[in-house]
Amino acid sequence: MPTNHDIVAAHYAAGEAGDLEGMLAPIRPKTRWIESAGFPTGGTYVGRDEILPGVFGALNELFDGFGFQLESLHDAGDTQVAIGDYVGTARATGKPFRARVVHVWRFADGEFTEFEQFADSATVMAVLQA
């Protein structure tokens, strides 16, 4: 059985490979996905039916080459912390960006329950402005 750390590492490996289904694999119907206030997709989404269009679909519409570049992944048991950078280019303006981000993953009873993003929203929002 994969550990919480294995599950999160697999999510990021799937992202690197462009495998959206692999990225979404740990999401359960009650998984909460929290995007930072002020971020283009800011808000709370619950379950795959909200997370897929509200986060991944929306980011794909706003940015070319949007991705997360993992710098480090820290194993704290039921909490996993990923540190890295978002990169991409705003479709509307053609402006590229690199913004610092931290992802906090929470697990309970072996199930992925919550994701929380802490991002440099100002840098990302700035490239969306003409």
Image: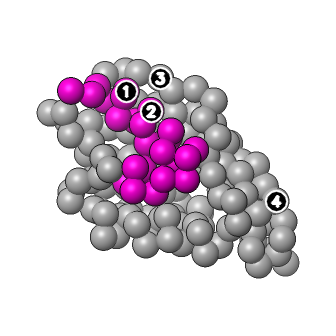
Front residue of this view, candidates 35 and 70: 70
- Marks 1/4: CA–CA distance: 31 Å
Q: Nearer the viewer, mark 1 or mark 3?
A: 1
- Marks 2/1: CA–CA distance: 6 Å
Q: Residue at x 31, y 22 (%)?
A: 77
Residue holding disc 2: 9
Q: Residue at x 58, y 44 (%)?
A: 16
Name the amino acid type tagged 3. Answer: His
User: Which callout, 4 or 3, points at the residue further toward the start of the chain?
Assistant: 3
Circles 2 and 1: CB atoms closer than 8 Å: yes
Name the amino acid type tagged 1. Answer: His
- Marks 4/3: CA–CA distance: 28 Å
Name the amino acid type tagged 4. Answer: Pro
Residue holding disc 4: 96
Is residue 74 rendered magenta in the image?
no
Q: Within 10 angstroms of label 1, few (less than 14), some, or many (20 or more) residues?
A: some
Q: Residue at x 76, y 63 (%)?
A: 89
Left or right of residue 35, residue 85 in this image? right
Q: Residue at x 36, y 28 (%)?
A: 6
Q: Which residues are magenta?
A: 1-24
Task: Look at the image and tell me in which quarter the N terminus lies.
Answer: top left
User: Which callout, 2 or 3, points at the residue further toward the start of the chain?
Assistant: 2
Residue holding disc 1: 5
Q: Within 10 angstroms of label 2, few (less than 14), some, or many (20 or more) residues?
A: some
Front residue of this view, candidates 58 and 129: 58
- Marks 2/3: CA–CA distance: 10 Å
Circles 2 and 3: CB atoms closer than 8 Å: no
Give the main secondary structure of the magenta stretch. helix
The image shows residue 31 at horizontal and vertical percentages of: 27, 53
Residue holding disc 3: 74
